[in-house]
Image (cartoon, rainbow, N blue to C red):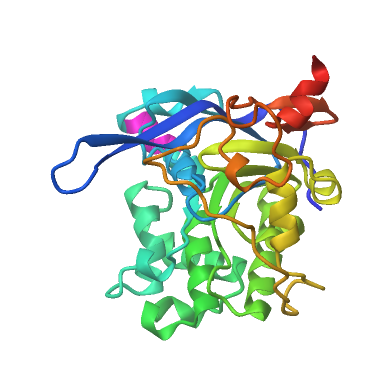
Amino acid sequence: MPTAMESGPLLEVEHLCVTFSARKGSFGPRLALKAVDGVSLEVASGDVVGLVGESGSGKTTTARSILGLQKPDRGSVLFEGREIQSLSGPDLRALRKRIQLIPQDAIGSLNPRRTVRQTISEGLQVHKLVPKESRQERVDELLADVGLAPEFADRYPEELSGGQIRRVCIARALSMGPSLIVADEPTAGLDVSVQAQILNLLQELRRRHQLSVLLISHDLSVVRYLCNKVAVMYFGRIVELGETRDLFSDPKHPYTRALLEAAPTVSAIGRGNELKGSIGGEVPSLAAPPAGCSFHPRCNQFHQGCDEISPELFELGGHRSVACLLYSDRSQ
């Protein structure tokens, strides 16, 4: 399991809130839909932090805000001590080189009319990272870094397998010389054997290039394998934070426990899985959020106050935090 290197936080997200506007029906009033509600987390140099939760929990919106692609309503995103939203022009371009995305829709992120060489060379050219006469050599180096032979440089996306497309996206991200990679479901849609290859590649590249990673995933087996810290999101909020080993062996929040109980059983990465179950109930609508704790309509440990009080993250010690009245009540 990866271990964080010495230094302060590389990335600091504080009280992040993102609201979208949507109309209720064709002629109804416009509604404010809070997709991210007060999210705070840190990624230290060398960390691999997993951001997990069901679809619609706010993971991708949080990631887009970190990448500077989504402006938050409130809160801040500091990267290497600088507020991303306050930057513009050359400063913003320089920062974006340092934070790179491995997108979930890997094939959709590639221009079908451009070869692999053209795709990877584009960033090198735009940011003037490598002289023209050295770009071909640099592309070959990047392809070798992700396990692709030089002949792949002249292929088009349609000539690549799913795993090869992911490797090209990783090479493109590495070409910028980042210190933080945001990996959004990097193994989604791949066969389990190819998933294992991509995860092993990310693990090796993290060590080789001293990268930090924010991994967005709903696959707990991937998070357990790759991450040293985990943040669990539900309905736009982080409900539990902790070291991976502690969180998986002793989950505190009822939602975290439900996720683990419903997750596939994986004997080893790449050897298949067996679905154990699903979480009862449905994720509430952003248009009609429940009062109190947003998980209380689905929670099997509901007690007095859960439908009235929305708990903040409470520090348990040992790098553990949980947003649940079961634990905050104990401090009173």
> Could you tell me residue 244's position as x and y percent?
78, 47
Question: Can you name the residue that lies furthest to the front here?
Answer: 304
Q: Nearer the viewer, residue 24 or 216?
A: 24
Residue nearest the observer in this picture, 128 or 315: 315
| Vertical position of residue 181 compared to residue 103: above or below | above
Identity of the residue furthest to the left in this view: 27
| Residue 262 visible from this viewpoint | yes
Q: How many marks?
A: 0
In the shown orientation, is residue 27 left or right of residue 317? left
On the rendered image, what quadrant is the C terminus found in?
Answer: top right
Task: Assess whether residue 273 is covered by the magenta stretch.
Answer: no
Identify which residue is drawn at 55% across, 76% down.
163
Residue that protrudes farthest toward the top in the picture: 332
Q: Quadrant location of residue 70?
A: top left
Write the residue at 30% across / 74% down: 112
Image x and y of residue 318, in percent: 85, 30
Q: Main secondary structure of the magenta part?
A: helix
Q: Is residue 190 above or below residue 132?
A: below
- Residue at 32 percent of width and 50 percent of height: 126
Q: Which residues are magenta?
A: 90-95
Where residue 308 sits: x, y (%)? 58, 26
Residue nearest the observer in this picture, 245 or 239: 239
Instruction: Residue at 72%, 76% (x, y): give it.
Output: 273
In-image side of 54 versus 125 (left or right): right
> Is there any visible trace of residue 204 in the rendered image?
no
Q: Is residue 147 left or right of residue 227?
A: left
